[in-house]
Amino acid sequence: MEKRLNRADYLFSLVIVFMLVCIAGAFFYGVKIGREKTDAKYAVIMKNQEEAARKPGAYDQQHLVSFYHSILAPYREFQLKWFEQIKQLDQGNPSIDPADVMKDLSRLALQKVTETSTITMPVTSPLLVEAQQNYMKSLQLFSDTLKKYQSKANGMHVSVLLSELDKDAFMIEAKRFSLQGQQQYYSAMTKWNETVDQQIKGLPLLTKSPISVTDWTQMSLVVKNNAAANIVLNGKWFTSYYPQDITLRIEELIASGQAKKMNFNDIPAIIDTLIGTNAIRQGDFIQSKQKYYANETLPQLPFFSQQ
């Protein structure tokens, strides 16, 4: 015979339901409080960063040059070696041992982490501080991930190895950190530009998405480089060339009328095509900068004047 619930059973069930409701309510309330505290924390951080950026000398020439030599140059040494070795593997160079490539690249990345970790960027330049952190995170992830592939590289066909590296989640994150650091460095250059020119052409257009060809023609060179760095970060385009090389090729495409003929209306679409067709080379900017940017203001950094 089926036993009927008595009043005590009903009361017990109600108490359980009530407790579950209270627990759920407390959980969501805790989430709400936690979110509010986090938002408040980051609001303070952002406010402090904005205030720091407005201080005289926050992003002066000396800080940009110091970052270039102590952070970017070591990272670029690894980055260029990475592209060189991956190209050799992709071309099937028989003298290249995949396991040795993984080992050497992992070791170089770790060496550069050690080298850049001893450098201190000024707290008054938060973009440079964050850029350094992101470049170091990128190097550490490259080192750890490549070390993982070292033991199994020779047991895989090269095409499979490259495919696995390309889609590896940690490798993707390593590239993202690199692009984030790059974007922050170019944003710091824009901050520097604001200290030497109170009326920077096209600065408000940086926040537009997508940036149109018309918008592009209204920007100064520093702002264009910043926009290119923003776009490659969003597009996750990890390349061997600099944003200014991309800027120069966009300029040529627009000036020649090819952008109009190809019905390009926005800059991300142009960059996508240029990168997808391998139409950009490291050093493009230096070779043709005088033709397009003879009167533009730039910080005195080596990669704007040297190969």
Image: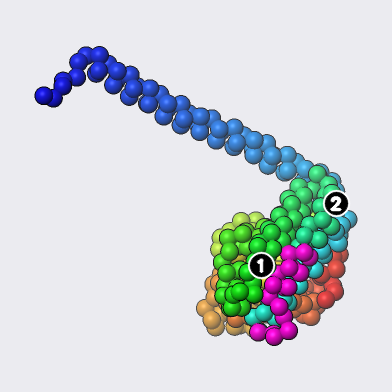
**Nearer to us in this view, 84 or 144:** 144
Residue plotted at (81% across, 52% down)? 117
Instruction: Point out the image quarter for the N terminus.
Output: top left
Residue plotted at (20% across, 15% down)? 6
**201 falls in the magenta region:** no
**What secondary structure characterizes most of the magenta part?**
helix
Identify the residue at the far left of this view: 1
- Would you identify the image quadrant in which residue 238 lies? bottom right
In the rendered view, would you say 234 is above or below 12?
below
Q: Amino acid at mark 1?
A: Ser
**Nearer to us in this view, 17 or 281:** 17
User: Which residue is denoted by mark 2 in the rendering?
Assistant: 118
Relative to residue 73, is residue 21 drawn left or right? Answer: left
Horizontal and vertical percent position of residue 33: 54, 30
Question: Which numbered dot is residue 151?
Answer: 1
Horizontal and vertical percent position of residue 295: 81, 71
Horizontal and vertical percent position of residue 307: 83, 76
**Would residue 37 be visible to someone looking at this image?**
yes
Horizontal and vertical percent position of residue 46: 68, 42
Q: Earlier in the sequence, mark 2 or mark 1?
A: 2
Residue plotted at (65% across, 62% down)? 148
**Mark count:** 2
Q: Amino acid at mark 2?
A: Thr
Which region shows up in magenta? Answer: 92-108
**Nearer to us in this view, 107 or 279:** 107
The Cα–Cα distance between marks 2 and 1, rounded to whole angstroms, is 30 Å
